[in-house]
Image (cartoon, rainbow, N blue to C red):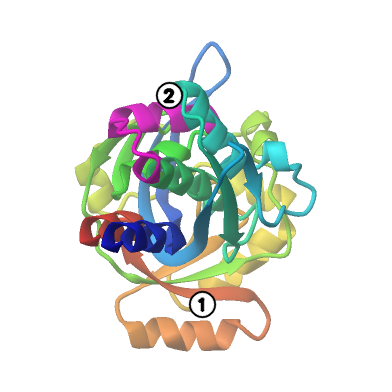
Amino acid sequence: MGQTNNKQTVWQQRWPAPAKLNLMLRIVGQRPDGYHLLQTVFQFIDLCDWITFHPVADGRVSLKNTLPDVAEADDLTVRAANLLKAETGCTLGVCIDVEKNLPMGGGLGGGSSDAATTLVVLNNLWGLQLPLEKLMALGLALGADVPVFVYGHSAWAEGVGEQLEQIEPDEKWVVVIKPDCHVNTKEIFSAKNLTRNSKSIKIADFTAGQHQNDCVEVVCQRYLFVKEALVALSEFSEARLTGTGACVFAQFESEDAAVKAYGSLKAKWQAYLAKGINESPLFSMLKNR
């Protein structure tokens, strides 16, 4: 009886899918297939979507609530669950309930994080026992940002973003602004005037303060709201773009300074107050189970 209750409790848990920030982003080349070669630093923040998984008897994968303009079959969580089933021959079903808190199209990795939480948690709940490396490879098939969420720790990333090395950047308070626009990542990476030949740097260079984002100029030329958000945020601390945006962020040395900036900005902007974290809250939760 105790085991059954425990199993039910595990299925009823809400699992976090945290946001990420790119603390810097350099484009150091391009592959023959068109993919860009990057150097970037991923760090999680404590803003999360929350996902609950409900077992179903008919073996199907479904969503409790679909996202606007996204077909159920195309949703990254559904694709992640079906990919796990295809990879392992698992015949179990699940209904996925996503509490969406992270803005879509903002460069915070919400969809990728949701997919990673689905891979990691269902691997656990379904007893599939795929190793982390395999889950990361499956994640890469869903999107370039999925592997770091499966990896579960702040990382220095190279390649297309899938070659990861664990690092420990300072866990600072951050204010994030989501401008009222969606940046088309493909459009930015296709832009003729995008810098594609930045010099590679070392982790020590980043730690010493080199944290440019090579996409900023192109994004600001095409999306005035992003440029305005960077200007507004830079009154309080150094403002940066995460990924290709649209979200911009600034780090603060103290909670008080971050709270003050957030208080000033939230009247005009869709703003978030958060804390940088190096271990994904998903992995903290799995450890404590």
Q: Position of residue 126 (x, y in %)?
A: 40, 40
Q: In which quadrant of the rendered view does residue 281 lie? A: bottom left
Q: Residue at the location (60% across, 47% down)?
A: 217
Q: Kindly identify which residue carries mark 2.
A: 88
Where is residue 1, by image quadrant? bottom left
Q: Earlier in the sequence, mark 1 or mark 2?
A: 2
Look at the image and give the residue range highlighted in magenta: 123-142
Residue 48 vertical position relative to residue 80 in the rendered view, above or below: below
| SS state under label 1 | loop
Sort mark 1 into few (<14), some (14-19) or many (20+) by Cα contacts within 10 Å: few
196 or 241: nearer the viewer: 241
Name the disc covering residue 235, or none.
1
Q: Is residue 126 magenta?
A: yes
Q: Can see residue 278? A: no
| Residue at mark 1 to residue at mark 2: CA–CA distance | 52 Å
Q: Residue at x 47, y 31 (%)?
A: 84
| Amino acid at pointer 2 | Thr
Which quarter of the rendering shows the C terminus? bottom left
Q: Residues within 10 Å of mark 2 (few under 14, many from 20)?
A: few
**Residue 139 on the magenta segment:** yes
- Looking at the image, residue 180 sits to the left or right of residue 17; the answer is right
Residue projecting furthest to the right: 69
Decide: is 14 above or below 135.
below
Q: Position of residue 257 (x, y in %)?
A: 38, 85
Answer with left or right where residue 189 lies relative to residue 210: right
Q: Residue, x 29% and y 44% (percent of image)?
A: 155
Residue type at the position of mark 1? Glu
* Between marks 1 and 2 in the image, the one whose residue lies nearer the viewer: 2
